[in-house]
Image (tube, helix red, strand yellow):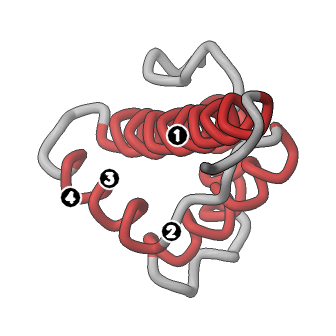
């Protein structure tokens, strides 16, 4: 049977699948937030995103509580924060490039 809540894009699909696999295969003794943090950091390394913090993962989990598609919402909120962190990092790099290409600080 297929999972209707399984994300279609990466890195969300990777995080979703790995989290479910680890919970099913006995790696779920740690708290769900700690396990998700480890999985999300592994995905961040694999896909070139900044690693999420514990606070971001915990906040994302609180947003997902009570939804039918709890895990899907949780994963999507984490991936959104990873995208946002990457864009902030890129914007900072662009700003520094502009400053240094114009002769630096005055």
Measure the alpha-carbon separation of dots 3 and 1.
Answer: 19 Å
Residue at 45% in and 34% down: 80
Q: Secondary structure at mark 1?
A: helix
Q: Which residue is mark 4?
A: 62
Q: Are marks 2 and 4 in contact (CB under 8 Å)?
A: no
Q: Quadrant of residue 9?
A: top right
Q: Residues within 10 Å of mark 3 (few under 14, many from 20)?
A: many
- In the picture of the structure, the residue carrying the numbered disc 1 is 88
Q: Closer to the observer: label 3 or label 2?
A: 2
Residue that lies at the very extreme toward the left in this rendered image: 66
Q: Which residue occupies the foreground of this view, 37 or 22?
A: 37
Q: Residue at x 39, y 61 (%)?
A: 56
Of marks 1 and 2, the one in the foreground = 1
Pointer 4 or 1: first along the chain = 4
Is 27 on the left or on the right of 28, as rendered? right
The residues bearing labels 2 and 4 have C-alpha atoms spaced at a distance of: 14 Å
Report, in whole angstroms, how far the alpha carbon at label 4 lies from the one at label 3: 5 Å
- Going from N to C along the chain, the mark reached first, 3 or 1, is 3
Question: Upstream in the sequence, badge 2 or badge 4?
Answer: 2
Q: Which residue is mark 3?
A: 60
Classed neighbour count for the residue bearing mark 4: other residues with Cα under 10 Å, few (<14), some (14–19), many (≥20): few
Judging depth in this view, the residue of 35 and 5 nearest the camera is 35
Percent coordinates x, y for residue 31 in the rendering: 46, 82
Q: Circle 2 sits on which residue?
A: 53
Distance in Å between CA atoms under marks 3 and 2: 11 Å
- First-in-chain label (3 vs 2): 2
Q: Earlier in the sequence, mark 1 or mark 2?
A: 2
Asked if residue 1 lies left or right of residue 100, the reply is: left
Question: Where the N terminus falls, by quadrant?
Answer: top right
Which of 3 and 97 lies nearest the eye of the viewer? 97
Residue 75 sits above or below residue 5 on the image: below
């Amino acid at each position: 049977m297929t999972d209707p809540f399984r994300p279609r894009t990466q890195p969300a699909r990777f995080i979703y699948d790995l989290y479910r696999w680890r919970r099913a295969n006995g790696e779920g003794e740690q708290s769900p937030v700690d396990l998700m943090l480890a999985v999300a950091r592994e995905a961040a390394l694999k896909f070139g995103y900044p690693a999420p913090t514990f606070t971001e993962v915990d906040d994302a989990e609180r947003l997902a509580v009570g939804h039918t598609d709890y895990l899907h919402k949780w994963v999507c909120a984490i991936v959104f924060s990873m995208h946002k962190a990457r864009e902030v990092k890129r914007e900072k790099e662009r700003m520094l490039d502009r400053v240094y290409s114009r002769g630096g600080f005055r």
